[in-house]
Image (cartoon, rainbow, N blue to C red):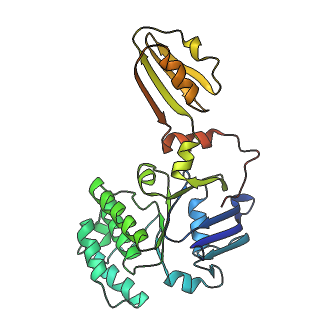
Amino acid sequence: MTPAIRTHGLGRDYGPVRAVAGLDLVVEPGQVFAFLGPNGAGKTTTIRMLLALQRQTSGRAEVLGLDCARDYVEVHRRTGYLPGELALYPRMTGRQHIAWHAGARGLRELSLAWTLADRFGAVLDRPARDLSKGNKQKVGLILAFMSRPELLILDEPTSGLDPLTRSEFAGLVREVTAEGRTVFWSAHELDEVQRLADRVAIIRQGRLIATETVEALRASTPQTVTARFARPVDPALFAGISGVSVTSCAGAVVQLRVTDAIGPVLRAVADHDPVDFTAQHADLDELFLAYYRQPTAAEPSHAS
């Protein structure tokens, strides 16, 4: 199948500043693909190149098999977009924005727009200048989803939303991908990403440093093991086990960091009268921070 998004060597310079460098990225249809990085990492610049809102300095980008720079009109027709800095016409209401957007896209059937407005509890009859950040974001989500696009490109889509609306957004994303459509989601808040994303890419200083499934990323991270014993134990018992380091020891409770197979740890614990035992992989927040602590000198700039 044709990838929803494919880039090869994609780059963008602003004078001497390299915002995005040598980006090789593949997003398959029907995925929720999370594009992670802090502000300034190059996420929004990448999105703007995918939509031909900015020209790339180097490389190539395709969306739905179309060349982004050459076929941008067709790309826009088949894509729903929510920008990170949503700009609404201040004097127009949400309802007027929906009508204007429908006219621009040639949409005559607006039932989905009104359904989404109900789901999100959107305020549609007040001028945009009078709306809160969260209510403006709800309007932006309606505009992005209302045409049932093949690909949704969402830049920080849950910014400003309350927990109930975030829950509705998560349900909507699941419905979209169940239909075989694709969501490319730029984010730096990771809670929803952990629950919704099929694959994750991490970008730092304009370079892609990791692309993997959420499960595989978690599996590759250290486990934190906590063992509680019937009586105090000597933490040196674990010192000779490959890939194990003792992070704390308080009487009968020992905490370990395990980067290798856990079997030897289980056997060592079982030999010393354990009362309780837990093992937990790092969550996505910890993983994200770990990647950002790594040195930048020899980072790869590609993934698949």
Q: Disc count in the image?
A: 0
> Residue at 23% across / 71% down in the picture?
118
Q: Quick check: can you spot residue 202? A: no
Report the side of 130 relative to 198 (left or right).
left
Q: Is 15 situated above or below 39? A: below
Relative to the observer, which residue lies in front, 36 or 241?
Answer: 241
> Residue at 62% across / 38% down in the picture?
293
Report the side of 158 relative to 267 (left or right).
left
Q: Is 288 situated above or below 125? A: above
Percent of width and height locating residue 152: 47, 71
Q: If the image is split into quadrants, where does the N terminus sit?
A: bottom right
> Residue at 56% across / 52% down in the picture?
37
Res 124 → quadrant: bottom left
Report the side of 100 relative to 49 (left or right).
left
Q: If the image is split into quadrants, where does the C terminus sit?
A: bottom right
Q: Is 292 situated above or below 123? A: above
Percent of width and height locating residue 282: 50, 38
Percent of width and height locating residue 264: 58, 25
